[in-house]
Image: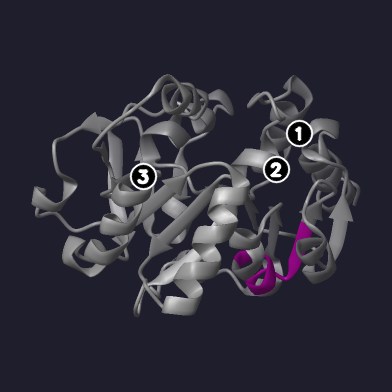
Amino acid sequence: MTYRLIALDVDGTLLTDEHELTAQTIQTIREVHDQGAHIVLCTGRAPDSTLPLLQQLGLEGTMITHNGAATVYADERGLTLVNEFAFTLPEIESMLGYVRKEGIHFDVCTSFNMYIERISAYEKQMYKKFLITPKLVTDVSELGLPIVKYTLFSQSDILDRVQKEWEEQQLYGHLRMIRSGDLFIDVMSPAANKGNALKALAASLEIDPSEIMAIGNYYNDLEMMDFAGLGIAVANSPEGVLKAADAVTSSNNEQGVHEALVKYCLSY
């Protein structure tokens, strides 16, 4: 099978735990690209913190960001918004009240900017890892902007409790709540996921799902892995993701993306 589009999750999949791209992985991705495949980074990151990785790969093209809520095209002219699934700040007011009362860190994102109300050294370190520079405001509720993602950042046991309580209370209403990592909960439009964004991109490129390979590591990758003709999980994925995958490759720290691309794209 010839795969014409390769969808790659970033953190925990493409990058090592030190948030680094290995030289061998870069070389292999370039070889696959040079054979004619579209390389698409599909990530929970914002465009600005995804673009440096695309540039490190020596590529331009489409990035699916904010877990599918914003699709952006990057070239020498800059970033262009292709599609977004947005919601309004009043729709998350009850959740904002909850996290403010509990002292849980959060941010809200438009397609191109992130806003926070407070920050400590712990959060600064996290944002630095992800190449993010959030904007500090007094009250995000006063922004009056369409939002594509609302994210909580805290210890996993705290988020386990929040997730349980919000599900019991349906505090997120018609919106979609997902666990995008042990330390993150995202709330987005119900239409926003990596699978829907990938489906729209494939249609615009006239690429059949059977010609798509997707590699991920967490629950927010399941829709794109399911849409793709071949959905691959890296070995460091949770058990539920491993079971849902069509195939499993080595972990992110063992260059699993490189291994999968060599096996399925360069070995013919």
Q: Nearer the viewer, residue 267 or 213?
A: 213
Crowding near the residue tagged with mark 1, few <14, some 14–19, many ≥20 C-alpha atoms within 10 Å? many
Instruction: Check the image and tell me how it is coloured.
Output: one colour
The residue under label 3 is 106
Q: Secondary structure at mark 2?
A: helix
Residue span colored magenta: 224-232
Disc 1 marks a residue whose amino acid type is Thr
Depicted 9 relative to depicted 168: above or below: above
Q: CA distance from mark 1 to mark 3?
A: 36 Å
Residue 206 image point, x, y percent: 51, 70
Please provide percent x and percent y for residue 249. Answer: 87, 49
Residue type, numbered disc 2? Thr
Chain-order first, disc 3 or disc 2: 2
Residue 43 in the image: above or below residue 222 = above
Q: Which residue is mark 2?
A: 13
Q: Which mark is residue 168?
A: none
Q: Which residue is mark 1?
A: 28
Q: CA distance from mark 3 to mark 2?
A: 24 Å
Nearer the observer: mark 2 or 1; the answer is 2
- Label 2 to label 1: alpha-carbon separation: 15 Å
- At x 38%, y 60%, the residue is 69
Return the disc, 1 or 3, that comes first in the chain's sequence: 1
At mark 1, the secondary structure is helix
Of residues 125 and 199, the one nearer the viewer is 125
Decide whether residue 129 is among the magenta residues. Answer: no
Say if residue 250 shows up in the picture.
yes
Tags 2 and 1 touching, CB below 8 Å = no
* Residue in the picture at 71% in, 52% down: 217
Residue at point 49%, 55% (across, down): 185
Q: Please, what is the three-letter code of the amino acid marked with disc 3?
A: Phe
